[in-house]
Image (cartoon, rainbow, N blue to C red):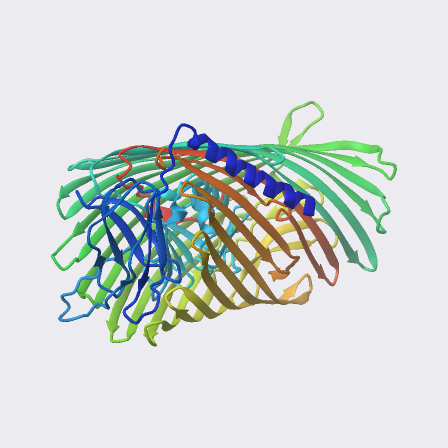
Amino acid sequence: MKILKTRVIQFLLLAVFLLKSLTSQGQTDINTKVSGKIMNSSTEPSSFASVGLFKSTDSVLLKGTLTTEDGNFIIQSIPAGSYYLSASVMGYKKYKSQTFTVDINDNKKLDLIYLVKESYQLNEVVIKSNKPLIENKIDKTVLNIENSVLAAGNTALELLQKAPGVSVDNKQISLRGKSNVLILIDGKATYLSQDQVSDLLSSTQSSTIQSIEIMTNPSSKYDATGNAGIINIKMKKNQAYGTNGTINISAGSGRYRKTNGGIALNQKTAIYNFFALYNYNDNIDFNSLTVDRYTTDMGQSTFFNSSSFAKYQNRAQNFKVGTDFNISNQSTIGFIVSGNLRRSTTTQSSINYIGSQPLKIDSAVVGLNKGKNPNNYLTYNLNYKAILDTSGTELSISTDYSSSRGKENHDFTNQFLDQGLNEYKTPDAFRNYTPSNADIYVAKADFSHPFNKNTKLEAGLKYSAVRTDNNLVFDHLLPNGSYNNDVKRSNHFLYNEDIAAAYVNFNKEFGDYSLQAGLRAEKTNSTGNSLTTANIVKRNYIDLFPTLFIRKKLDDDQTLGIGFGRRVDRPDYASLNPFVYYIDQYTNQYGNPYLSPQYTNSYEINYILKGKYTASLGYRKTSDAITFVLLTDPVTKAISQTNMNLKGYSYYNLNLNAPVTITNWWNTYNNLTLFYNKYNSDEIEGAPLQREKLAYQISTSHTFTVDKQTTVELNANYFSPTVYGVFNLKSYYGVDLGLNRSFFDKKMDIKLAVNDLFNTRGKRTTYGSFPASAYDIHTNYDSRVARISVTYRFGNTKVKSTDKSGTAADEERRLKK
C-alpha cells in the first residue's frame, strides 16, 4: 500500500509538470501580482470577501478572487496597465480604490482596506455582492457553483460529492446516510432511474450549473415524495445575446472501458432563445456475486454456495432540444423535446453448489443468462411564464406528455450436475420476454405573489395520470427446438395512477425571525390489474402534508432554526407488478401488488455559525416502511427477492459540515453524519424482526490550487457498518484523485482522474439471519476507473448556458427501467 501511494504521488507530480510544460512553451511568464488585506470596520479580517480588479480605461473586470479566512488576497499574472480594485461582502458598503498603475514583474501590495458596515434606512438601500460558496437558508442549504473554482473541470455528479451531507457511490446518491433522494433539475425531477440519472449528471459539465440546493425537509411547494429529501440542481440561464457551445469527451478504463462524449449549443436573440444538448455513453461494466446461505425445515438443513459473474454493455443517447419565445417583455412561451435512448446487453454465468452439510456437494446447477434491454423514453413539454405586475407576481404553467417503451428479453439455460459434477438430467432452457409500455400526462400551474420584500405567498395545482402495461411471456424450449408458452409463469399486468395535488406556502420575515408555513394536499387513485390471475387492487385516498420552518438570528454570527414536514413514498410501478421472474429453480423475484405507501414525519433543529459552519439534529419516523427482502421457501428451498412493508422505521441523525480554508491554495469541505437506524416488523418468515444500529459516515474533499491553470482534487469517504431493512451491511471506504489543467484562456480543460484509487469501494458484504435461514452476500463491481476528459468551450463564452431541464412530467419518476 505504501509503495502504491508513493507511485501515485510521483505520477501526480509528473502529470502536473507535463501539463504545465504544454502551455509554457513559447510563452513569457507574467509575474506581476497585486495583493492586500481586507478588514471589517470592527477591525476583524473580512473572510471570503469578493475582490475584483478592473481596467481603469473601460471598467472591464480583468480578474477576481475571494479573500482567505484571515482577509488576505492575491491576484496574479496581471498585464502592465492602469487599474482599480473593488471589494464587497454582504452587509458592508462596496469598496472602490483609487486608480493605480502596475508594471511588468511588479509586486504591488496595497494598503490595508477597511470596509464600512452598510446602514438600512427606509428600505431604500440595495446591497449587491457575489454570493458566498455555501448559503444556509430557512429550508435549504445552497452550494453556489457559479463563479467559483468548482465550476471548472468537474461534472455535475462529481459536484454532488462536494455538497454538504451528500455521497455518491456506484451511481447511488444518498443524503445523510439515506438513499431515497429525489433529484430535481431546475425544480423538476428527472423521471429517470438511478443509473440513468447518474449517467445524465456524469455528462453534464459543472460550468453549466448555477447552484445546488439541498433540502432535507422540503417545503410544500415540492412533491411530497422522497423521505430522504431533495437535491435540486439549478442550471445557468442565458442573460446576453449571442451563441456559444461546449464539447466534451471522456475515455476511461477499469476492468473494462468507459467512454462518453457530447455537445451543448445555445443561441439567444431579442426574440427567441434556442438550446440543444446531445450526449452519448458507451460503457462496459461487471458485477460479481457470491452468496452463502442455508435453510432449515423439520430439522433438515440445506446449504447453498452460489457465485455468478455478469458483464454489461450499456449504450445510451441523451438529447434535449428546446426554444423560448418572448411574447412580450414580461411573458415567455417555450417548447422542449427530450429523450433517453438506451441499448443494454447482459451475459451472466453462475454456479450453485447444494449440499446437506457445509462444503459438501450433493448436486449443482450451472446457469447461463444472455439478455437484451432496449428502452426508449421521450418527453414533450409546453410551458408558459409571465410576470403579472410590477411587484413581481409570477405565473408559470407547464404541460407534458411522456412515453416509455421497453422490450427486455432474456434466454436462460440451467444444467444439473450430480455429486461428481456430471450432468444427470436434461438441461432446462427457457426465455423471458417482458415488453413494457408507459404513458404519462402531467399539467401544473404555479403562482407567487410578493406583498412586500418580507412577505410572499405561493400556491399551485398539479395533475398527473400514469398508464403502464407490462407483460411477461415465459416460454420453455422443447427438444425439437421450438418454444412453448408456460401460462402458469406468464402474466399481464396493467397499472393506472392518477394524482391531483394543490399547495399553498406562506413566507414571512419579521425582525430576527423568519417563518415559512405550507400545506400540500394530494389525492391518489390507483388500480393494479393482473389480467392473468384476475387480481385487481384498487386504492383511493387523500393525504395532507404540512411543513413548518422557523428561524431565529441570535446575533451577527449565529442562527438557530427548527423544521417539520410530512412526506410519502409510493411504491414504484415495478414493485407492484406480481410477476414471478424466474432466474433458475432456486432463484426468482416478484412484485407485491399489496404494497402500501410509506409515510414519514421529519423533525429537525439546525445551528449555523458564521453562515457556513452547520450542525443539525434530526429525527424521522416512517410507518409501513417499504424495504427489499429475501424470502426462503421452506419446501422448494428457493430464495425470492421482493418488497414488503415493515411495521416501522426510525432514523436519528446528527450532521456536521465545515468548509475550511487551510491556505489560499488549499480548500477543504468536510462532513460528518452520525445516524441511528431502527427497523421492526411483526413477522418475517414466522418470527418478529428488529434491526438497529448506530452508524456514521465521514467525507472530506480537498482542492489544491497549483497555479492559475492547474488544480488537484482529493476526495475520500468512509461508511461504517450499518443496517438497512432486513440486511446488515459491513463498512467500506474509497479515495478519489483528480488533476485539472486549463488551456487557451480557460476555454479548454483537460482532467485526469482516478475513482476509487485503492479499489475498495466496490467490494461489499451483506448478511442476515432468520430462525430458519441465513445468508452471507459478497458483491463487487467495476469501481476503480481511471479517466481522461477534455472539455472545450467555443463561441461567445460570456453567454450563459440555458438548459431548461425540468418539465412537469419529470416529476413522475417511479417507473423503473
Does residue 789 sit above or below 532 in this rendering? above
In the figure, residue 125 lies in which quadrant?
Answer: bottom left
Q: Is residue 808 left or right of residue 620?
A: left
Closest to the observer, 609 or 425: 609
Could you tell me if residue 783 is visible in this image? no
Is the residue 369 above or below the residue 601 in the image? above
Residue furthest to the top: 480
Q: Nearer the viewer, residue 416 or 195?
A: 195
Q: Position of residue 579 (x, y in %)?
A: 57, 45
Picture quadrant of residue 416: top right
Provide residue 35's location: percent of width, then percent of height: 34, 53
Residue visible at 51% across and 36% down in the picture: 17
The total number of labels drawn is 0
Q: Nearer the viewer, residue 505 or 812?
A: 505
Q: Quadrant of residue 491?
A: top right
Q: Nearer the viewer, residue 619 or 454?
A: 454
Left or right: residue 461 versus residue 701 is left
Residue at position x 49%, y 66% from top?
A: 655
**467 relative to 690, above or below:** above
The answer to whether residue 731 is visible is yes
Residue 707 in picture, x, y percent from top left: 43, 43
In the rendered image, residue 557, in percent from the top left (x then y), is placed at: 36, 71
- Residue at figure coordinates x 51%, y 43% from the top left: 738
